[in-house]
Image (cartoon, rainbow, N blue to C red):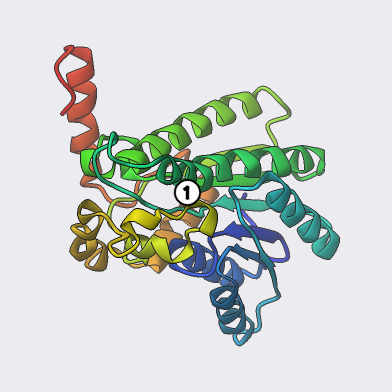
Amino acid sequence: MQEFSGKVAVVTGGASGIGFGIAARAAREGMRVVLADIEADALERAAAELRATGADVLTVPTDVARAESVAALAERAVAAYGGVHLLVNNAGVVSGGPLWERTLADWEWVMGVNLWGVVHGIRSFVPLMLAQENGGYIVNTASAAGLVTAPSLGIYTVTKHAVVAISETLSAQLAQQRGTVKVSVLCPMWVNTRLVDSERNRPVTFQNPAIEADPTPAEVEAIRPMIESGKSPDEIADAVFAAIRDERFYILPHPEVAPLVRRRMEGILSAFEPS
């Protein structure tokens, strides 16, 4: 995709962080933007900020963990704008700590947003993109934790490895079609977002009453300084749009991830323990 002006971008998790950075860049490129997020108040604030710049913005409160909610997002986007040219499956949350200590609610919440959110996005948007004359583009937000293992962020790491695998598979399958829908997977390291504060959006259904007084595991809180000193969402958005223009599959905004990936691959090939 070389030209963006007049086209339609749908961004989940679009009210803040990387999602808002990508949405703002899409608006600057002249795209019409569909902002989706579970955080309704933040969604409207984000939309107001974009509209103040002259952007054409539609807001759709969306719980990406629910198939019917994502299907409704696709329907709203098509009804408003006639099609969707760029889908960014970006919504994500984090939970950490030993895998055997995390509750089923933790697993269901993080898997629902990070993994099933991408699945629902693919199922709802790929068919309509394939049916469009000019196809479309999909960006799935994974993480450097999808390329290397982050033991302190167990469930999160599981989901992000899955997102990378889904993206690789989807790209190969779409190449066997007409080739009009392309895919990239975004794998950043530290980005200055509110990821550590994901608990603010945990649905009541997946709450842990027993640990309500201290909902954020220490392992997650420990990464706050790295998050706060990370790249800006605008920098990540620049990398995303450069990759879309180049049709580059892996988006690696942090060059320092490369030696970590190399070390992991060498460990696999030599049958060592995971590094």
The residue lying at 40 percent from left, 66 percent from top is 233
Closer to us: 267 or 158: 158
Query: Residue 16, position in %: x, y?
Result: 47, 69
The residue lying at 70 percent from left, 53 percent from top is 69
Query: Residue 85, position in %: x, y?
Result: 70, 52
The residue lying at 45 percent from left, 32 percent from top is 162
Q: Residue under circle 1?
A: 243
Quarter of the image containing the C terminus? top left
Query: Residue 156, position in %: x, y?
Result: 36, 43
Horizontal side of 42 relative to 123 (left or right) equals left
Horizontal side of 91 relative to 191 (left or right) equals right
Q: Residue furthest front?
A: 210
Res. 77 image quadrant: bottom right
User: Visible in this render: residue 275?
Assistant: yes
Q: Residue furthest bottom?
A: 52
Q: Is residue 148 above or below residue 255?
A: above
Q: Residues within 10 Å of mark 1 (few under 14, many from 20)?
A: many
Q: Is residue 230 above or below residue 120?
A: below
- Secondary structure, mark 1, is helix
The residue lying at 37 percent from left, 66 percent from top is 194
Closer to us: 249 or 153: 153
- At label 1, the amino acid type is Ala
Q: Is residue 144 above or below residue 81?
A: above
Closer to us: 151 or 147: 151
The total of numbered circles placed on residues is 1
User: Visible in this render: residue 84?
Assistant: no
Query: Residue 271, position in %: x, y?
Result: 18, 12
